[in-house]
Image: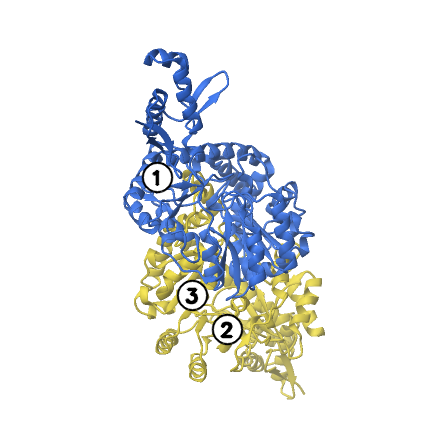
Chain colours: A blue, B yellow
Amino acid sequence: MVGIGRDEYTGRVVATSGGFLYEHLAAELGQAIDRGALRAGDRLPSVRRFAQERSVSVATVLEAYMRLENAGLIEVRPKSGHFVRRRSALIAEPRRPRSCSTPSRVTVSDAYTKILAAMRDPEMLPLGCATVDQAFLPIQALNRLVIQVTREMTTIGARYEGPPGLVTLRRQVARRAVEAGVALGENDLCTTIGATEALSLALRAVARPGDVIAVESPAYFGVLQTIEGLGMRALEVPANPRTGLDVTAFEDTLRQQPVRALVVTPTVSNPLGSVMPDEERERLVRIARRYDLPIIEDDVYAELVFDGSRPRPLRAFAGPSEDSHVLLIGSVSKTLAPGYRVGWVAGGRWHDQILRFQFSHTLACPALPGMAVAEFLASGGYDRHLRRLRAALAGNIERYRETIATEFPEGTRVSSPLGGFVLWIELPPGVDALQLHEQALRHRVVVAPGPLFSARQRFTNFIRISAGAPWSERFAEGLRTLARLSARE
Amino acid sequence: MVGIGRDEYTGRVVATSGGFLYEHLAAELGQAIDRGALRAGDRLPSVRRFAQERSVSVATVLEAYMRLENAGLIEVRPKSGHFVRRRSALIAEPRRPRSCSTPSRVTVSDAYTKILAAMRDPEMLPLGCATVDQAFLPIQALNRLVIQVTREMTTIGARYEGPPGLVTLRRQVARRAVEAGVALGENDLCTTIGATEALSLALRAVARPGDVIAVESPAYFGVLQTIEGLGMRALEVPANPRTGLDVTAFEDTLRQQPVRALVVTPTVSNPLGSVMPDEERERLVRIARRYDLPIIEDDVYAELVFDGSRPRPLRAFAGPSEDSHVLLIGSVSKTLAPGYRVGWVAGGRWHDQILRFQFSHTLACPALPGMAVAEFLASGGYDRHLRRLRAALAGNIERYRETIATEFPEGTRVSSPLGGFVLWIELPPGVDALQLHEQALRHRVVVAPGPLFSARQRFTNFIRISAGAPWSERFAEGLRTLARLSARE
């Protein structure tokens, strides 16, 4: 005798014992959904028609549908009928990592160089790198601006635009910051080679080799690499899948040991996609001030919250700009053009030092890409583009989640990001993400293995995948490959 | 009774005692030259005519002219007559600094930020920054290439060109390196944000904070700033005005104390304009190998030797590429477009480490400027451009030297560079270059004060001026202003 149940982790339909007719019906439908014969969004036959087809009573069908609804497999839409629910609604989120009190030298991994190298190979399915596909970017408009700028400012390449960099760009960035609630002027900003240089300069301004830098756990591996490159140590503080850095755990850490700075992404963290609530932001800024601790705030995903809100950066809670202990970092690499390498930093108290460091490490940013971006920001086309991009990415994320929920082995969990375009996948215990990464490469699929996101090589059974490209059968196939490889491990 | 003599330092004509008629004549002509009544290149009256005019014998005039010739004031051109020599041929070169055995933390000076800031002010006379004026650069051709590249490679900005960077650019740079005698392939190279990032990455690859880095004295202040920015110490080794780094003094230094690396510009050093002879290059490479010492070779001026020779880089003397202890650095900032920020490094033994550091500090270079430069290098227009540029700069340098020789106070010495476009001026003892720099700014003239070129703030009575802009009355006036300010000090 069968009935239906749901696996704790995956929400996958499983048969349970039981003998009533409605249980058999429910199990049959549940398995059809599970096999994909009925797909998310499909309408089930009407109660009356199904009862006729199967020669059972309306009450039996109603009871079966109710079971499926209770199991989360279908949903009732008033006046429309019963529909198969998205499977992704059922899959659990990855678990929050445990606290860890020992700072570590970051261990270099080769995985990230492979990820970057694979990006240049068009044969590779680009699930590894956190960039948006060109199909979602306003490349045409930017190209037109490049040509226009080149024609109008004919001598733009002929001189160094030394620190703090192009004033036109700084003015536009400051304007948008003010709109987001941060009192910034053009003189509070320095343009950089993407957010990566901004982070490197900010870290060097506030800390020395050997110093301990607190990071979210999991953390974007680029942050860890930069910390490593500067000879500093990373201390991982647990982050919650929805709300980001655990501020209480962070405060505990500060009580226990010397920390020199915090690097944090309050809005759409990478890889979790979490967004820190305003109260937590305020609390974090207050705590940091009490400990005289600089916060380096990575705000690169801030425009990509799906609901269109633009959370106030920590910097907005941190008092006057020139004396701020929050160093705000941004770029257009996630929203306009990664290859332009246009970023910025508002260094607060460390602004002058950042200008000096930039002078001695890159001397100046190339003017042309910055000029084109400034023109784009000034045009007003940016907000229109962002609205479209957010909608496209939200749809994408749901599509990827759905496929993961359907295809990946039991015990898989996946993040439910509030913005951005990456998913953090916890695979069943025992799956080795580094091996999976290697095997996937052989199938021309690139993913970012979990240990990259930890200075201590935790997250051995996690991977991050990017959902920044338009959905296609190629991506579906890539995900199925990953699912197969994960199941085999 | 008067005769003529020449001041030891300036070559300025001075009267000496003596009573012969030819001595009086010679003194009179010499003083006319000194006052500028007779100018460089002017033809003197023929011997016969002058004898008639003055009612003296031809022998007396001949004797007077011979005296002037011996004093270096005039020259005989066969079948043309006697001509006033360039004054710049007479002015002495700056003196070689003494050795100094203590490495120093570099002391930061604000002067360089003022120099950079002043660059953006079109009201300022740009004698401070070592860049070539746009009038000498092929900006139009580059702009056309930018537009062409943007049209043809429409998605060039849409992805990261992570380390080692654009292969098209690396291929062109490798091709030119091979022509210069260095066996380099595209895989030996990494593109960078100008030579400044290349230097920063190279230094970080070979040394740690606190390490001692040997530099030429005087050294380009950017090198000193980068060393300072990385928390390393600079040790100055004397350089000769014509042949650059004193290799014997350098070897003595290595015997006496631990040195972690050498940064050197063998071809057209900045500020001296020296070119190291091949035998010295070979010797330097051999000595460094014996001490297992990495050499960071700054080759950015290598295409700007006036006689069109392209000296083989040290790297050419240093064995197979992948194991080389010479890290070769270059850029197009001195020859094509400073604002493009296109440079490169061939890291030899440290290549992989440089790629990793770049990944964590800038992530990637912007693709568009590099692509335009690669196209330009591939076009063959580069060599044509370089020929014109060298001729223009050589003429410029002579013009500036001439004016300095004529206008600056007694005791002034000036370098006689073999290439490039900067002049290193030793002002009379007692002139304070930092004060001069400040006063000049008030007259809207920017110069680089000597102490910037030393980690120990030596060269207190030196300045570097740039002769990278087409000559005009504005520059003549600027030099006269500097001369006046120097005389008043």
Q: Establish if B411 lies above or below A31.
A: below
Front position in the image: A151 or B150: B150
Badge 3: chain ID = B
Looking at the rendered image, the quarter that the N terminus of chain A falls into is top left
Q: Are marks 1 and 2 in contact (CB under 8 Å)?
A: no
Question: Which type of secondary structure does the marked residue at label 3 adopt?
Answer: helix
Q: Mark 1 to mark 3: distance in Å?
A: 46 Å
Seen as rendered, the residue at the extreme front is: A19
Question: Which type of secondary structure does the marked residue at label 2 adopt?
Answer: loop
Q: Are marks 2 and 3 in contact (CB under 8 Å)?
A: no
Front position in the image: B41 or B466: B466
Q: Residue at x 34, y 29 (%)?
A: A34
Badge 2: chain ID = B
Near mark 3 (Cα within 10 A), the count class, few <14, some 14-19 or many ≥20, is: some
Q: Amino acid at mark 1?
A: Glu
Q: Which mark is residue B210?
A: 2
